[in-house]
Image (cartoon, rainbow, N blue to C red):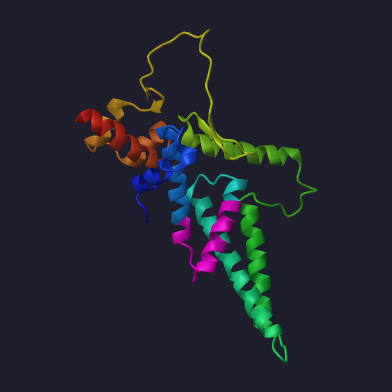
C-alpha cells in the first residue's frame, strides 16, 4: 500500500496542482489512496489488462457517486470483481464460439447470467441504477440524495472544500460573516477542524482515534493527518 505522504508529494509535483492548498492536496491524496486500496483488494484481477479495466470501472463509478462508508466500499469492490468475471466469461465464450465446431458451454452461459443478475443487484444497492426508473418517483430520488448528503456530512462536516459534480474540480465554499457576531471558535484553527484539548486526550491515549473522529464528525484519516501535521508539531 502506498504511503499517503508519497502520494501527496507526487500530486504537488503535477503542474495542475501548483495552486492547490495543502488541504486540497491532502483530500486528493486520500481519495487516490482509497481508490488504490480498493484496487489492491480486488479478488479477480490476474493481469495488467484486467487491472486497467478495473481502474476504469472504478473511476466511472466514483464519478457517478460518492461512497462514504465501508459497506459501500465493500459493495463496490464486489461489483468491480463481478464485472471482471463477466468479461472473462465472455472471452471464454467467444473463443469457444470461434472454434471450427462451436458449442457454447452451458455452465458458462448459466454463470454469465448469474453474474449479470448479481451486478444489477449490486448497482441498485449503490444507487447506480434502478430496476424500474419509470416508477421511481422524485420523492424517492430526493430521499436517496438526502441520505448521501448526510453520509458525506458525517465524515466531512468540518470541511469547506467540495467537488463540482459536472467538471469534478475542487472548489471552496466561503461564508459571509459581515452581519454576524464573531466569537472564539474552539474547534477550529484557521480553516482546519481542530481542538487542542481533544487531541491532547487522544495523545494521552484517553480517547481512541475512532472516538475523536466520531466527536468531530470526520474520518479517522483526517484525525491521523491533523495529529501528525498540527498537534505533534505544536507539541514540539
Tell me the chief SS of the magenta region. Answer: helix
Drawn side of residue 201 relative to residue 72, left or right: left
Magenta residues? 38-60
Choose between 151 and 225: the one closer to the eye. 225
Asked whether 12 or 105 is in front, the reply is 12
Q: Is residue 101 magenta?
A: no
Q: Is residue 39 magenta?
A: yes
User: In the rendering, at what x and y percent does residue 93 appear?
Assistant: 67, 79
Q: Residue at x 76, y 52 (%)?
A: 132
**Residue 124: x percent and y percent?**
65, 54
Residue 149, image x, y percentages: 58, 36
User: Residue at left 52%, top 22%?
Assistant: 174
Nearer to us in this view, 72 or 234: 234
Relative to 153, say whether 72 is above or below.
below
Name the image quarter holding the C terminus.
top left
Q: Which residue ends up furthest to the bottom in the rendered image?
A: 101
The image position of residue 160, as x and y in percent, is 49, 28
- Residue 232 makes an appearance in the image: yes
Amino acid at each position: 500500500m502506498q504511503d499517503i505522504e508519497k502520494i501527496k508529494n507526487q500530486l504537488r509535483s503535477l503542474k495542475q496542482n501548483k495552486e492547490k492548498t495543502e488541504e486540497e492536496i491532502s483530500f486528493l491524496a486520500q481519495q487516490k489512496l482509497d481508490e488504490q486500496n480498493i484496487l489492491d483488494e480486488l479478488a479477480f484481477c490476474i493481469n495488467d489488462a484486467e487491472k486497467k479495466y478495473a481502474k476504469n470501472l472504478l473511476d466511472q463509478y466514483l464519478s457517478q457517486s460518492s461512497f462514504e462508508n465501508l459497506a459501500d466500499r465493500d459493495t463496490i469492490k464486489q461489483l468491480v470483481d463481478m464485472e471482471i468475471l463477466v468479461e472473462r466469461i465472455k472471452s471464454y465464450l467467444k473463443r469457444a464460439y470461434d472454434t471450427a465446431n462451436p458449442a457454447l458451454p452451458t455452465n458458462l452461459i448459466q454463470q454469465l447470467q448469474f453474474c449479470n443478475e448479481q451486478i444489477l443487484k449490486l448497482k441498485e444497492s449503490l444507487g447506480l441504477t434502478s430496476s424500474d426508473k419509470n416508477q421511481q418517483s422524485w420523492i424517492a430520488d430526493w430521499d436517496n440524495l438526502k441520505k448521501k448528503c448526510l453520509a458525506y456530512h458525517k465524515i466531512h462536516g468540518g470541511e469547506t472544500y467540495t467537488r463540482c459534480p459536472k467538471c469534478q474540480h475542487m472548489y471552496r465554499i466561503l461564508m459571509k460573516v459581515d452581519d454576524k457576531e464573531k466569537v472564539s471558535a474552539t474547534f477550529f484553527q484557521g480553516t482546519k477542524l481542530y481542538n487542542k484539548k481533544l487531541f491532547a486526550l487522544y495523545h494521552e491515549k484517553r480517547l481512541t482515534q475512532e472516538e475523536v473522529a466520531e466527536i468531530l464528525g470526520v474520518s479517522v484519516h483526517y484525525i491521523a493527518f491533523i495529529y501528525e501535521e498540527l498537534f505533534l508539531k505544536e507539541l514540539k
